[in-house]
Structures are given as structure tokens and as C-alpha cells.
Amino acid sequence: MKLTSSQIKQFNTDGFLVLKNFADLELCEEILAKVEEHLKEKVSPIESEQEYLQNGDTKVTVRRLRQVFEREGVFKTWMTYPKIRGVLKTLLNDTPVLVLAHHNSIMTKMPQESSRTSWHQDARYWHYENDNLISIWLALDEEYLENGLLEFIPGSHKMRFEKEQFDAQSNFIDEHPKNKELIQTRVHTNLSRGDIVLFHCKTLHHANKNTTDKPKISFVYTTKGLHTNPIKNTRSDFEEIVLEEK
């Protein structure tokens, strides 16, 4: 697939791009079936809501399935999907490389038990020589504000912020005077099964908790340019897979 000039401009300007009806629906159904198996058995490694909130609750509500590339062949099929390689090469302006250190996850928002995801930039905890990284978010079913749809702040990947605008966990502080006005510019696009969102590692985004009675399940992984090197001996210095265009 080739992007139009307007799509390329939109990504470069806003820091994200929605591509509707991108993934094959049968593939999405296969992914979702396997995801449901792993969620039911709470197959490790996982991140739980309780662990994330550090509230000491012994209950385990899965927030994400981690390190999914090696879990199932169908997960690997999506993460190496030939159709997306040209898109990534265009946006990265480099050969795309699949990063297995970050994201590489199935993200959930469980009914009533999910937590809000605060405004943040993914690059806050990544360690690379530059910021030429893009994440790919796949909707496996309907996503909208009430069940935890992602919202973005357009152009935030090019903005410079002061340390005081973030808390100790590098979350963008909602009530900070400099942040309030910016947060008012947030935008969203409802997603359906097979839709994807590509977003820059420095684009501010967040998602509310799921207030519906049905789980929201999404697939997210990250890519970088071939010439974007991880800092040695950091969490980012991990296995990578070059995605040559087919």
C-alpha cells in the first residue's frame, strides 16, 4: 500500500494517522480468538491493573498481554504484515525494523475494572539515539470514547515541554496550567475492526477507562528506522527484526 501525499502530510503534521479497513477481517478474528484463550488462562507474561495501580489487591485483571510476538503464529503474521511495510518505510523514511522490547502487546480495557491511561508520550521510557519510532495500533473490535478509545493531541510530537509539565511517572499533568489549554485540542476517531492508527513515539495520547459491559481488546506494536539505534545496555537494547519491503 502507498500513502497519498495528504496522508503523509497529516502524519508529519499531527503525529498520527488513521487508516480505515486496513487489516484483513478474517485475520483479526483469528487474532481475537487466540487472544481470548490467553486472557482466559492469564498466560504470562502479563501486566495487571492491580500491578499497574500498585493497590495491593490480590485480584488479577489483565491490563495487557506482554511479549506476544512469540506466543502465536497469527500474532507474528500481523506484526510482519507485508501490506504495512511500504507505509512504514515512507513514514520512517528508512527501512522499518520491528522492535520487540516495547509494546509487542495485546492491550485490554476490561468492563468496569479498567483504569484510565493518563496523557503520556511513549518515548518517556524508551532509550534510542533519536525518536524515529512509530507504533501501530490495531482495533480488534469497535473502539469509542466510552470503552477507552485513544485520543491524541495533534502536533504534540514536535512540541517542547518543560519538566514541570510531567509528574514523577512522566505522565502529562492534567491540571498543570500550561497543559490544560493544550489538552482541549485533543481529537479522536472511532475505530472498527481492522482499522489501524499509526502514531509517533512522542505524540501525546491517553484513553479513559471502559465504562461499557464489554471488553475492549487492541493489538499494539512498535517499529523504528533501521538507522535508529538503541542505547546499549538499556531496556531498548533487545531483539529486533528488519522488515524488508515485499
Image (cartoon, grey):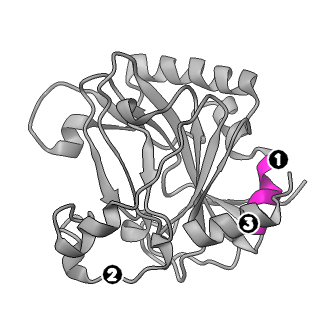
Left or right, 13 with respect to 89, comes to left
Name the residue located 25 percent from the left edge and 38 percent from the top edge.
Answer: 115
Q: Is residue 58 above or below residue 213?
A: below
Q: Amino acid at mark 1?
A: Pro
Dot 3 corresponds to which residue?
Answer: 8
| Snapshot quadrant of residue 172 | bottom left
Locate residue 109, reporting x and y percent.
Answer: 36, 31
Magenta-highlighted residues? 82-91
Locate residue 118, reporting x and y percent.
Answer: 28, 53
Depth check: give the residue in front, 198 or 40.
Answer: 198
Dot 1 corresponds to which residue?
Answer: 82
Locate residue 48, reporting x and y percent.
Answer: 28, 36
Name the residue located 32 percent from the left edge and 62 percent from the top edge.
Answer: 183
Q: Amino acid at mark 3?
A: Ile
| Snapshot quadrant of residue 160 | bottom left
Could you say whether the residue bearing mark 1 is in a helix, strand or loop? helix
86 inside magenta stretch: yes
- Residue 170 appears in the figure: no
Locate residue 66, reporting x and y percent.
Answer: 45, 41
Name the residue located 69 percent from the left edge and 40 percent from the top edge.
Answer: 20
199 inside magenta stretch: no
Residue farthest to the right? 246
Dot 2 corresponds to which residue?
Answer: 161
Q: Residues within 10 Å of mark 1 (few under 14, many from 20)?
A: some
Q: Is residue 214 above or below residue 203?
A: above
| Marks 3,2: beta carbons within 8 A | no
